[in-house]
């Protein structure tokens, strides 16, 4: 699976996804500081699932009606980076077929997946 990791994502998550064999582009390595709109456009252009911790993407998708091929929003404040990486890797390993075409929110206790039209 292809991923675009927003710069709000811990480097450990990117490393873990790459270790698990996923293709991951990381905004912090490519174009730090670009706008959220540019990040979303890049994810769509590259047919990648966007992984972010920035709630502004919910605003872009739901309030502004911007298209996403799939977004995984991490709400894992206070969780150690290594634990975050393990949680994300687990969700992707178990639920990856549900993430394209959806907006998903991962918390320490749950994963909510909302299909997009």
Image: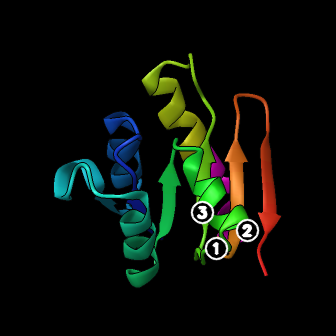
Is 59 left or right of 26, judged from the image as shown? right
Q: Residue at x 70, y 28 (%)?
A: 108
Q: Position of residue 85 (x, y in %)?
A: 48, 36
Q: SS of the residue at dot 1?
A: loop
- Residue 59 drawn above or below residue 67: above
Proximity of marks 1 and 3: CB atoms separated by less than 8 Å: no
Where, by quadrant of the figure, is residue 77 drawn?
Answer: top right
Is 101 left or right of 16, judged from the image as shown? right
Q: CA distance from mark 2 to mark 1?
A: 6 Å
Q: SS of the residue at dot 3?
A: helix
The disc placed on residue 3 is none
Residue situated in front as seen by the camera: 117 or 80: 117
Q: Position of residue 20 (x, y in %)?
A: 41, 53
- Residue 87 drawn above or below residue 45: above
Residue under pointer 3: 60
- Residue 86 drawn above or below residue 56: above
Residue under pointer 2: 98
Q: Residue at x 38, y 60 (%)?
A: 21
Answer few, some or many: residues within 10 Å of disc 2's Cα (few below 14, many 20 plus, some between 14 and 19): some
The disc placed on residue 100 is 1
Answer few, some or many: residues within 10 Å of disc 1's Cα (few below 14, many 20 plus, some between 14 and 19): many
Of mark 2 and mark 3, the one earlier in the sequence is: 3
Q: CA distance from mark 2 to mark 3?
A: 21 Å
Q: Residue at x 25, y 49 (%)?
A: 33
Proximity of marks 2 and 1: CB atoms separated by less than 8 Å: no
Q: Which residues make up the magenta segment?
A: 90-99
Magenta segment includes 10:
no
Q: How is the image coloured?
A: rainbow
């Amino acid at each position: 699976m292809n991923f675009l990791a927003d710069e709000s994502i811990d480097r450990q998550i990117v490393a873990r996804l790459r270790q698990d064999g996923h293709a991951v582009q990381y905004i912090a390595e490519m174009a730090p500081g670009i706008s959220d709109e540019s990040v979303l456009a890049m994810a769509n252009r590259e047919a990648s699932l966007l992984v972010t911790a920035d709630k502004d993407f919910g605003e872009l998708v739901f309030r502004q009606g911007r298209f996403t091929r799939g977004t995984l929003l991490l709400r894992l404040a206070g969780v150690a980076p290594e634990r975050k990486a393990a949680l994300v890797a687990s969700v992707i390993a178990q639920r990856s077929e549900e993430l394209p075409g959806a907006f998903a929110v991962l918390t320490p206790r749950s994963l909510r997946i909302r299909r997009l039209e």
